[in-house]
Amino acid sequence: MRLAHVYDYVIQENGSEGFYNELLQCLKYEQRERERAKANRLLKKAGFRTHKRLVEYEWHSQMGIPTSITREELEALEFVHHRENLIFVGTPGTGKTTLATALGIEACMNGKDVQFYRVMDLVDKLQKASQKGTLARARKSILTCDLLILDELGYLPIDKEGAELLFHLLSDFYEERSLIVTTNLEFSSWNKIFQDPRLTGALVDRLIHHAHIFSFAGTSYRYTNALSQLKK
């Protein structure tokens, strides 16, 4: 609905008195509509695989929140405002991806440009772009975002070319934009992913310098839910 139509509606409802108050209502309505449209565009662009909101997230006692950030600061996206990183480390099925996605959705709702990738999908995208001679364009499209979410780091090893491409991309994020990384491996095991101790050390150093590191433990939610379904 355009502003002129909204204004006509307000005048019909309230008469001609309070002109400036009515105009303010119209402008606020227009602003809300633009913000909602922008959020919808950002959500569509982000590439989330699920759409569970932060208010729906099930916080659990076996999730270790570091002392460097509070839950309230996390939900308020303070880490994005300060260009900090979040590293979610823990066993599969314990809520890492769900929380990363929920925070990404919240960022979109607040007008932030977010991109979500499974790590191997991003590596594949960079390698294909490199082969086609379009790597600079692919990198630029990613580097425009405010928050990059990398899911499932460590599930599969990355070859030398892919590791170097990912390293150079993430190096450009250092102190400029925020990252959320979910992984099932402790930092000491990241050599298994990148297969190059020097590159691994440099990458870990950049990621954790301005990072809040969360630990996730417990039984897989998917496994527990499957068992409960079988028992019914």
Image: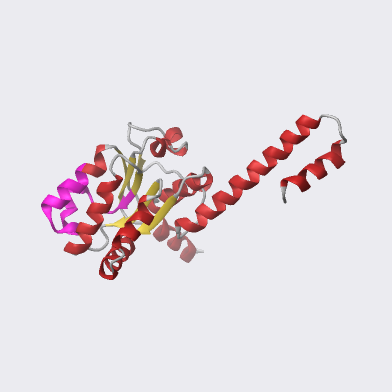
Asked if the magenta segment contains residue 200, the reply would be: yes
Q: Is residue 83 above or below residue 149?
A: above
Q: Is residue 213 left or right of residue 31?
A: left
Q: Is residue 54 left or right of residue 1?
A: left
Q: Looking at the picture, tell me which residue is in the foreground, 38 or 202.
A: 38
Query: How are the residues colored?
Result: secondary structure
Residue found at x 12% / y 56%: 196
> Which residues, given as a range, are shown in magenta?
181-205
Residue found at x 11% / y 50%: 198
Instruction: Give residue 220's quadrant in the image.
Output: bottom left
Q: Looking at the picture, tell me which residue is in the foreground, 127 or 227.
A: 127
Could you say where residue 150 lies in the image, as x and y percent from the top left?
Answer: 34, 54
Asked if the magenta segment contains residue 100, the reply would be: no
Could you say where residue 160 lies in the image, as x and y percent from the top left?
Answer: 16, 62
Instruction: Give residue 208's quadrant in the image.
Output: top left
The total of numbered circles placed on residues is 0
Main SS of residues in magenta: helix
Could you say where residue 173 lies in the image, as x and y percent from the top left?
Answer: 30, 46
Q: Is residue 169 above or below residue 30?
A: below
Q: Can you see residue 80?
A: yes
Could you say where residue 75 lies in the image, as x and y percent from the top left?
Answer: 46, 38
Residue found at x 31% / y 53%: 91
Instruction: Give residue 225's quadrant in the image.
Output: bottom left
Q: Can you see residue 158?
A: no
